[in-house]
Amino acid sequence: MSDKLELPDILVASGVITPDQKEKACRGAIASKCSFGEAAVKLGFTTDEAIAIAISKQFGVPYASRENKILRVEKGQNLEHVVSESYARENCVLPLFLDEGVLAVALTNPEDIMLRDNLKLLAAGLEIQSFVATRAQILKAIDEFYTSGGGMIEKSMASAATSPDEVQEVESTNDGRVDLDQMVKGAEGAQVVSLVNAILKQAINERGSDIHLESYDERVMLRFRIDGVLYERMAPLKKDFNGVISRIKILSKLDIAERRLPQDGTFSIKVQNRNIDLRVSICPTVFGEKVVMRILDKGAVELNIDKIGFEPRQKEDFLLGAHRPHGLIFITGPTGSGKTTTLYSILNTIRTPELNFMTIEDPVEIKMAGLNQVQVRANIGLTFAAALRSFLRQDPDVILVGEVRDQETAQTCLRAALTGHLVLSTLHTNDALSAVVRLIDLGIEPFLLSSSLCVVAAQRLVRKLCPHCKKPCQPDAKDVEMCIRESLLDPPPDPARITFFEARGCDKCARTGYSGRTAIYEVFLIIPEMREIIYKYGGDLARLRDAAQRAGMWTLRASGWRKAIAGTTSLEEILSVTIEE
């Protein structure tokens, strides 16, 4: 019996799949010209982890994963010189440790004799001990070990190691404060300055949106958020941590001696002739302070309504509301879903010298000529509501309010809309039409809301498939049926012509399979029938959804399906970001 037939039997004997699923996966493997394990996973019968465990039983080699603590590289053995990063990525293999003439490696296929022979040559004749791991976990471990994106942090740390005495651990006093002179000395050391610069440059080069730096009992963790997902990178040493935090505080003009209270600040840097703002938040934890830096790269934000993800009908409906002389427009969605970018893209489209634009935000993240932008300063009484009251005496035409958080702000926005101004703002609700319920809960009378509301929209961000390595995949019949039902396309697409794409990973996308993000929307233009429902029934979501659907408007899930059919994103992304209606 061939090895390929042994794996299905192991899975059946272990109760992972049924005999019927085994037969279907075998047929799928033959039809797709892939391995049995890949076919079983694509059909949803099992997981990559279960396949890897079965392979370990089949060949009698250990299973390695992040959970069982085996899939980790032994530090200090110079394994990056034994197996280069490019070779590790190309062959999906990770060196784990050296022990008495044996090189342990994690790979996906222990049967690959050629790979094992090549590794033996790279390791100068050392014996190779194989461990089985999933492709996804090996690639993530490679990211962490080799510090993709140039390895700036690793190089900076190597440089700092040549003069370790320049950075000293700063001890806290009993009340949580520290010796200021000692702290400043540590923050201004050449190694600390170089290390902070390396962290910032590497995060920017990798298209990171946030930098997370946190301390634990025995280690420091550094992570970059790239395309909405956190990836771990090589972190500073524990002894350097306080110096790095102090350096960031100095750049942000914060109190470097205060370690008991949260602090917020900002600073700007110039990288490759690009001005980049960083918003810093520092929070005390039981093991030290945690820093999160939001990277605001003005050059990376394109305020073009044609390129942010609107479907043609959605763009048309949104602009119908935005070109009205007065009324309320709301965008909903969680923090970090791109609401501000969408609002500024709309303002950039309707901006003319004949109109007076005023904005109140917390904070002002995008600066645009032609707009009078105000930063909230609650400590001196400059709140959203207070600024709005002042705006009404400034002869505005269009007002942007960063967020409606309370009754006073909601009522002031409504008053501005009713007195001849176009007001754009955001709310935190799960979908667009829930904004109606939220505003009524904040004390807005339904009869006033029905006459002033123009557009409500919701948005989410989904990762875009890397155009260099995305691969067509055979969709499951259930997924195709769900796509046709929920996409609300007219006419419905032919099931035989629907093709989904999946993430694979290449050097251009750092082996993630994704590159960049785009938005999916639901945009509801408030038509007369919906106004009547708000007036008579208040926040009756079922009636509002029915009226919107009859008018040809659709939900986030439908917008997501259209992006998946177009090959912009993957099925997995849509199912993880949206919910079934």
Image: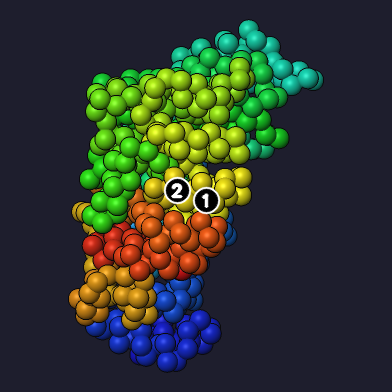
Q: Is residue 313 above or below residue 496?
A: above
User: For the residue marked with disc 1, what is the amino acid?
Assistant: Phe
Coloration of the structure image: rainbow
Q: Which quadrant of the rendered structure holds the N terminus?
A: bottom left
Question: Which disc, if any, is residue 363?
Answer: none
Count of residue discs: 2
Label 1 element class: helix
Give residue 421's position: percent from left, percent from top: 40, 33
Q: Is residue 469 above or below residue 414?
A: below
> Left or right of 320: which side holds 327?
right
Give residue 13's position: percent from left, percent from top: 51, 87
Q: Is residue 294 above or below residue 316?
A: above
Residue found at x 32% / y 29%: 298
Q: Nearer the viewer, residue 44 or 496?
A: 496
The quadrant holding residue 538 is bottom right
Give residue 482's position: percent from left, percent from top: 37, 75
User: For the residue marked with disc 2, what is the amino acid?
Assistant: Ser
Answer whether labels 1 and 2 touch (C-beta < 8 Å): yes
Q: Nearer the viewer, residue 340 or 509?
A: 340
Q: Nearer the viewer, residue 10 or 277?
A: 277
> Left or right of 510: which side holds 180?
right
Dot 2: within a 10 Å radius of its alpha carbon, few (fewer than 14), some, or many (20 or more) residues? some
Residue found at x 35% / y 75%: 485
Q: Can you see residue 486? A: yes
Question: Which disc, if any, is residue 451?
Answer: 2
Question: Which disc, if any, is residue 447?
Answer: 1
Q: Can you see residue 523? A: no
* C-alpha span from label 1 to label 2: 7 Å
